[in-house]
Amino acid sequence: MARLEDIRAAGAQKVVEALPDNPDIVRATFRFPDYKNAYGTYLLGKLSNIFFPNVMPKLLAFGKNSKGAYYIDVERVPLDALHLTLQADLNKDAMSKKSLAAVKTEHNSHELAYYTRERGEKFDEMMQISASFHDTGLPFDSHPYNWTQAENRLRNVDFKSPWIDAANTKGRHFNVEKLKSHIETLDEMRKKEA
């Protein structure tokens, strides 16, 4: 697993950082104080984990910090060298020079080549997972930066916003009817198991 001090990713919607007092959790803090968007992301993320537990991490808590920013606490997922290096490149302005240097030098060219090759070989599987999310009505961000294959397990570590725009006026990234249908299917499967 990545060292705690190396876990920091800043995207358009969220900043993700390790919690120093709990090594099993990372916190995704929303950049904008929009309750509807933050809580919607949390709820759809919970459904993503229920529908795809082998792909998506568990969302553990939703809250608001002392600065008024909403956050989601998420199960910490092992990250591979390629993911860490890509994130370091994306976030180089926000990372300390010491942390950036540690990420860059920690992973040798053989390790990066291995994960780059593996990611290429898993491309079809990644696209199939993306299609499965679409089929269930869930939003999904299949960008290469959001995947990791640490411990030989393909995982996606990002949760997409439910709304297309910040004002929540242009529509949504999820499909209500498909979600309802998929939830009913899960309910039927659970009834059969009981």
Image (cartoon, rainbow, N blue to C red):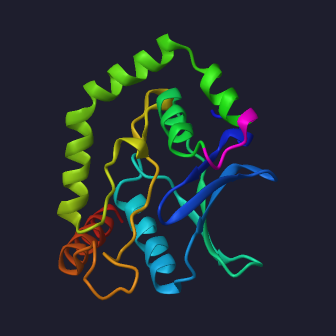
Question: Is residue 94 shown in magenta?
Answer: yes
115 is higher (above) or lower (below) than 29: above
The image quadrant of residue 28 is: bottom right
Provide residue 111's location: percent of width, then percent of height.
50, 16
Q: Which quadrant of the view contains residue 153?
A: top left
Q: Could you say where residue 65 lies in the image, as x and y percent from the top left?
A: 72, 76
Could you say where residue 179 lies in the image, as x and y percent from the top left?
25, 74
Query: Is 140 displayed left or right of 70 in the figure?
Result: left
Q: Is residue 123 above or below residue 183?
A: above
Q: Quadrant of the N terminus?
A: top right
Residue 53: x and y in percent read 41, 52
- At a point 50% along the width and 44% down the height, the residue shown is 90
The residue nearer to you, when weighing 142 against 57, is 142
Q: Residue at x 65, y 44 (%)?
A: 7
Among all residues in the image, which is located at the extreme top? Answer: 110
Q: Is residue 12 left or right of residue 173?
A: right
Residue nearest the viewer, comparing 179 with 168:
168
Provide the residue span drawn in magenta.
93-98
- Image quadrant where residue 115 sits: top left
**Outermost residue, right side:** 21
Observer-nearest of 54 and 8: 8
Residue at horizontal 33 percent and vertical 29 percent from the top: 119
